[in-house]
Amino acid sequence: MQKLEKIQKICTDHAITLFWEKPEGRTDACGYGILLDGERHGTAESTHYTIENLESGREYKVQVERYRDGQCIAVSEPFVLCTEQEKEKLDITKEPYCAVGDGNTLNTAAIQKAVDDCGENQAVYIPAGIFLTGALCLHGNMELYLEEGAVLQGTDVPEDYLPKIWSRFEGIEMECYRSLLNLGKMDHGTGCDCGNVRIRGKGTIAGGGKRLAKNVIRAERERMKERLEALGEGIAEYEKEDTLPGRVRPKLINVSNARDVLIEGLELRDGACWNVHMIYSEHVVTHHCTFRSQGIWNGDGWDPDSSENCTIFACTFYTQDDSIAIKAGKNPEGNVINRPCRHIRIFDCNCAYGHGFAIGSEMSGGVDDIFIWDCDLGNSAYGIELKGTRKRGGYIRNVQVRDCVVPRIMFHSVGYNDDGEGAPVPPVFEQCLFEGLTVLGEFTDVDGEGRRLPCLAAELCGFPEEDYHIRDITFRDVTLNGKAGTAGQNISLKYCKNIVFDNVRA
């Protein structure tokens, strides 16, 4: 009997969530069984399972089995887990906080006081209602819980997100407006200095969205007036005229230099920029969340940035930009700071609307060991996209994508976000595996009219110098679903070497 290893566990007061990596080998006709105190509790098709309605403060014996064709082929060691004791609730609507959930009253001071008061065995509790607030600063060893029907609603007033803090946008460290929720102080020269934070529940965290973004850009354009005028035609190096003043927009949730952060069960929506951004952080787990940012420029969903051992699963994305974007700094600063993004796990996620999953284009510090499985990106624009520019330097390597549905696969250089002094050498893209994929050969034009349009099944374009060709890429057991004779059944290769096709079929 094989051993099923590396089961990770999250215990809350009334639930235990288990998750594990997908084993190598055949995955058809496979499933999992979960035993609780020796009894079958349930089954799972993907590599996670949540046991709910448990008693708080009690030990449970748990075991996970893997099945194929009804036969048990692997089993984990039994392990004992203890649910947490119920925490004392600091209800923000009660004395001494007295927040008002009418959608009009500004509650920043009241909620911040509850956060400041929150101890390790307490939770800031947000009941049903719409609680309007500006930026809030979290701290280590705390919990924020949103009840069903609770909305933590960010304002659209830029002054409510001041003073600015050091953050990172598109690979460059700079002073940005505070996010709606802020944890940790960013410092690329140190490790994590806070953690053990939970942001969870059944409610919604909503940003100021497009209106806040426009208001910030308007204010920043006035502040930067002389610099923008001095650039003249040089502004063409940037994606659009809002790019420079827009870089300081607040995110929805900012996690800096923090470890052991859980984001669970929430709807996360309408950040003025990206929704969840973790910088120089470790062990950030996000699961069973819905991300919504349709209609918002740069509305990324979940962005690990020079961070390690971060995991996301069982999430659904409706985003105007990348649903997930893995980043590691931008030239020249990212090459100097040289902090990679690595050991990222993404599974059982659905991109219902958005660009898909991106690695880059900010990857100057390097990206290593990315594993994606059991995801449906069929309705996205780009599917799996590995991207950089010639200036970046750095590397993307050891990317594994298994058992997913995608419109296309892309390795390429992009023509935007290309300002800054270049690295001495181009980036390297290498050592990737794409296995068990269905590649549709058509994409959703989410930046246009949402139409379905044909595209190449895969496009790999490296750099002309032989040492910077895309190399050591394997496609195994891949099905191309494009109609016969269309681009959807074609793969384009340029400046590549050692590209292996094993059982790629139309």
Image (cartoon, helix red, strand yellow):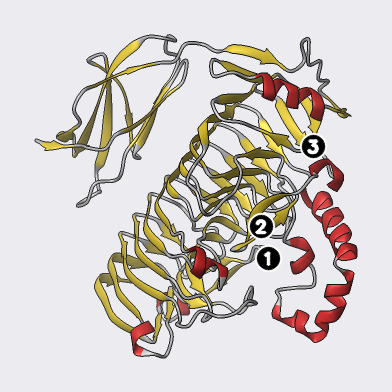
User: x, y percentage for residue 213?
Assistant: 79, 54
Mark 1 Cα within 10 Å, few/some/many (few <14, many 20+)? some
Q: Earlier in the sequence, mark 2 or mark 1?
A: 2
Circle 1 — which element? loop
Three-letter amino acid code of the residue under disc 1: Asp
Three-letter amino acid code of the residue under disc 3: Gly
Q: Which residue is mark 2?
A: 320
Circle 2 — which element? loop
Q: Can you tell which quarter of the image residue 253 is in?
A: top right
Q: Residue at x 65, y 28 (%)?
A: 203
Mark 2 Cα within 10 Å, few/some/many (few <14, many 20+)? many
Q: Is residue 360 visible?
A: no
Q: Can you tell which quarter of the image residue 134 is in?
A: top right
Three-letter amino acid code of the residue under disc 2: Gln
Q: Which residue is mark 1?
A: 447
Q: Which residue is mark 3?
A: 134
